Image: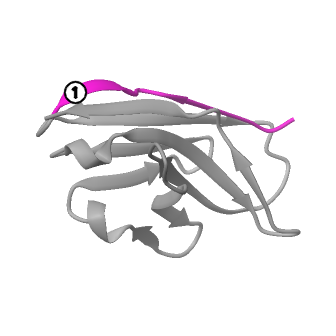
Amino acid sequence: QVQLVESGGGLVQAGGSLRLSCAVSGIGFIIGSMGWYRQAPGKQRELVASDVIGGTTNYADSVKGRFTISRDSAGRTVWLQMNSLRAEDTAVYYCNVRRSIPPRDYWGQGTQVTVSS
């Protein structure tokens, strides 16, 4: 059974930093990508950053230059380093693993990030 467990969320002042972690277990397939999404109240879930295995990393325009995604070589942990946080970064952040064949998304339970201005 695939499990994704996020940690590292919390309350931080604007301009501060947080590092999110996602521990992945139960993977028995080829991973296409690992990434982070977020959902703010009243808004749709949106991509924050993704790491395509063997490919490129992608970032939302709003976080470029401030957030960095990384993972271990085994694909068992993925991190999101968030610097220069803004109030508009407040959201629930979800870890995502995308299976290549057949395509399927797996999600963590989410971790709350609150940035006070």
- Residue toward you, 100 or 49: 49
Q: Main secondary structure of the magenta part?
A: strand
Q: Is residue 117 left or right of residue 82?
A: left
Check the picture and name the quadrant holding the C terminus.
top left
Q: Is residue 10 magenta?
A: yes
Q: Position of residue 101 (x, y in %)?
A: 85, 69
Indicate whether 68 appears above or below 115.
below
The span shown in magenta is 1-13
Q: Is residue 1 left or right of residue 91?
A: right
- Residue toward you, 14 or 102: 14
Q: Residue furthest front?
A: 42
- Residue toward you, 41 or 108: 41
Identify the residue position indicated by label 1 in the image.
Answer: 12
Query: Looking at the image, what colour scheme do you see?
Result: one colour
**How many circles with numbers are drawn on the protein?**
1
Q: Is residue 92 magenta?
A: no
Q: Position of residue 30 (x, y in %)?
A: 78, 61
Q: Residue at the spot x=37%, y=67% of the render?
A: 60
Q: Secondary structure at mark 1?
A: strand
Check the picture and name the quadrant holding the N terminus.
top right
Q: Is residue 78 left or right of residue 113?
A: right
Indicate whether 25 appears above or below 33.
above
**Residue 54, quarter of picture:** bottom right
Q: Position of residue 50 (x, y in %)?
A: 50, 62
Q: Amino acid at mark 1?
A: Val
